[in-house]
Image: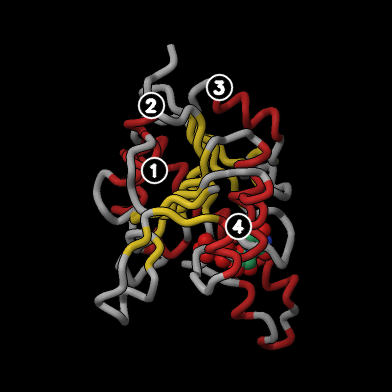
Amino acid sequence: SKPSNKWQRVLLKVSGEALAGDQKQNIDPKVTMSIAREVASVTRLGIEVAIVVGGGNIFRGASWAGCSGLDRSSADHIGMLATVMNAIFLQATMESIGIPTRVQTAFRMSEVAEPYIRRRAIRHLEKGRVVIFAAGTGNPFFTTDTAAALRCAEINAEVLLKATNVDGVYDDDPRHNPSASLLDNLSYEDVTSGDLSVMDMTAITLCQENNIPVVVFNLTKHGNISKAIMGERVGTLIGR
Ligand code: UDP
């Protein structure tokens, strides 16, 4: 039986920074637990949830490239491994509250997680399991936002839900300008032509080309993840 919500299959992007919460450690277990609880509440309604995790709380390739001879590709390999650590943590948290969860990695680490196999990922989702996609796209020079857009298109998810620690996209930086206002709706062109920092160009153009709506919303507000997944109005909607 199909629930009466807006989406049937969603791709949730959780950045590494969001996982860190306001803790000094890389991961705040309160954050992973609140993500797990909110995801649980919607999977119970039959909504299929796939997750792409970032790794910026542990390692960002671009900011380390050049240090001690580390080339960008090697730095990005480390960055992708960081996303696997987050994925395993999130999986453990989900399973601790009874949500069957599979991690699929973009490059093989078969003792630790399944390799990414599109059809198998879709099968897991159909069986009500959450699938966490780790290791980004598997390629250096990309981001996990791009991985989120790519996986979203591949598995035919209807929307990319980008969880951040701000309420959405503002016309100016709200941390520096208190009168900055939240933008409810944006076109892809607003994002690609302006200087709004929403996601990198590769990610947003991939969404545009495949007509994938993007919702940017605040994960730190209780209930927001489930609201976004349920298709309720939250944050900024980017689309046509
Ligand atoms: N990364 C990569 N290819 C990808 C995705 C990620 O090389 O397809 C690397 C890159 O070094 C990046 C790091 O993994 O800095 C962590 O990902 P990201 O910065 O996107 O994480 P987030 O900002 O979401 O925490």
Between the residue at mark 2 and the residue at mark 1, the CA separation in whole angstroms equals 26 Å
Please state the horizontal and vertical placement of residue 203, each as a whole percent of the image: 62, 57
Disc 3 marks a residue whose amino acid type is: Glu
**Whole-percent x, y for residue 115 in the image:** 70, 41
Tell me if 7 is positioned left or right of 105 in this view: left
Quarter of the picture for ligand 1? bottom right
**Which amino acid type is shown beneath numbered disc 4?**
Ile
Decide which of 45, 200 is in the foreground and name it: 200
Q: Quadrant of residue 113?
A: top right
Sooner in the amino-acid sequence: mark 2 or mark 4: 2
Q: Quadrant of the N terminus?
A: top left
Q: Secondary structure at mark 1?
A: helix
Q: Which residue is mark 4?
A: 204
Q: Earlier in the sequence, mark 3 or mark 4?
A: 3
Disc 2 residue type (three-letter): Asn
Q: Is residue 111 above or below residue 121?
A: below
Could you tell which of marks 3 and 2 lies nearer the N-terminus?
Answer: 2
| Residue picked out by circle 2 | 5
Rounded to the nearest angstrom, the CA distance separating label 2 from label 4 is 25 Å
Amino acid type shown at disc 1: Thr
Q: Which residue is mark 1?
A: 93
Q: Residue at position x 73%, y 65% from top?
A: 140
* 4 vs 1, front mark: 4
Is the distance from the Cβ of mark 4 to the nearest ligand 1 atom less than 8 Å?
A: no
Q: Is residue 89 left or right of residue 156?
A: left
Callout 2 crowding tier (Cα within 10 Å): few <14, some 14–19, many ≥20? some
Residue 178, compared with residue 213, is above or below; it is: below
Cα distance, mark 4 to mark 1? Answer: 30 Å
Q: Which percent across, then down, holds residue 60?
A: 57, 71
Compute the Cα span from label 1 to label 3.
21 Å
Which element type, helix, strand or loop, lies under badge 3?
Answer: helix
> How was the colour assigned to the protein in this rendering?
secondary structure
